[in-house]
Image: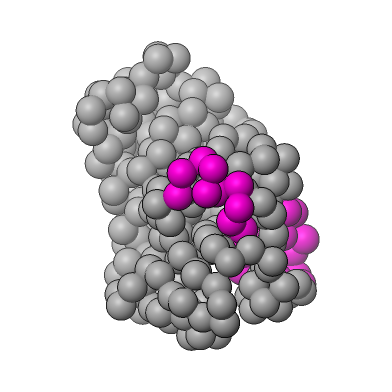
Amino acid sequence: MQALIIIGHGSHLNAESSAPVYAHAAAIRATGAFDEVRECFWKEEPSMREVFDLVEADEVYVVPLFISEGYFTEEVIPRELGLSGPAPSVTRKLGRTIHYAGPVGTHPGMASMILRRAEETAGLSHEQARGAGLIIIGHGTERNSNSAEVIYRVSREAGEAGIFGHVRTGFLDQEPEVGEVLEAMEEERVVLVPFFVAEGWHTQETIPDDLGINRPAVSTVTEKDGKVIFYAPPVGTFPEIADIVLQRAREAGARVPEGLSVEAAGV
C-alpha cells in the first residue's frame, strides 16, 4: 500500500485557508492513484503530529502545499513529522518509509499554469494578452530570501514565454511594493495573480484594499486610472495544482502512472 499526505498551513481564523488542501486531496483520491490520501496542517486539525496515526500504508509520500522552500518546509514540517531532513529526503520510522517531496510552488510547471489562468481570468485572446500586463503578487519577507526567489523565477519564466506584454513582480512585505508596480505598468489591461495558496485575509481584503480595486466578492474587474485591472484567484486554488501534487509524489518515488492526471481522470 502507498499513502499520500498533503500538508497545508491552515488557520484558526480563516476556514478558507484549508479549502485547497481538501479540494486537491479529494480530486487525487478519486483517481485511485493512492490507497490512502490524508490531509494535515500546522494550524488546524488534523495536526502533523497525529497524521501518521491515520495512515495504514507502509510507503508514505508527503507533499507540502506551500509556495516556497523555507522555514516551514525545511524546519517545521521535518520537525513535526520526525523526518530525517528537508526535501528530498527518505525517513524510515515505525515500520514505514516516508518520502518527503518539495513544495508545489517550486514546480517547473507553475509559470505556464499562471499564464493560462491569467488569460482565462481576463477573458483575453492570445493577441489581446500580448498587449496586456501581468503582475505576479508574492507575500515576501525580509527574513527568508527563498520566499521571493521563487516568485522572481516564475515571473521571469512567464515573461520569457512572451504571452503578455510585460510580466512584473510585486510584494506585500518587501520591495518592490505591488502598488508601485501596478502604477508603473504601461499597459491599459493588467492581470493580477496572487502567488498564494488559498483565499484569505490577504487575497480577499489586504491586496484589493491596498490597491484600491474591487474585492473579489464584489467583482474581479476594476476600472481605475485609465486601466482595466483583472484580479485572479490565488495560485493554490487552481485545479491544476492537484496534478502538480501527483507529479511531486511521483518524483519522490510514488507509483503513479506517467499518463495519469486529475483532468484525464475526469475529476
- Tell me the quarter of the picture where residue 133 sits: bottom right
Q: Quadrant of the C terminus?
A: top left
122, 136: nearer the viewer? 122
Q: Position of residue 147 (x, y in %)?
A: 68, 59
Report whether residue 64 is seen.
no
Q: Position of residue 25 (x, y in %)?
A: 31, 42
Asked whether residue 147 is drawn in magenta, I would say yes
Report whether residue 222 is seen.
yes
Image vertical order of residue 206 relative to residue 21, above or below: below
Q: Residue at x 72, y 40 (%)?
A: 160
The stretch of residues the image draws in magenta is: 124-153
165 vs 216, left or right, is right
Q: Position of residue 15 (x, y in %)?
A: 30, 70
Q: Quadrant of the N terminus?
A: top left
Image vertical order of residue 61 relative to residue 118, above or below: above
Q: Residue at x 30, y 23 (%)?
A: 264
Q: Residue at x 55, y 49 (%)?
A: 129
Asked whether residue 186 is drawn in magenta, I would say no
Tag count: 0
162, 56: nearer the viewer? 162
Image vertical order of residue 67 relative to residue 266, above or below: below
Q: Residue at x 36, y 43 (%)?
A: 239
139, 15: nearer the viewer? 139
Q: Position of residue 72 (x, y in %)?
A: 60, 58
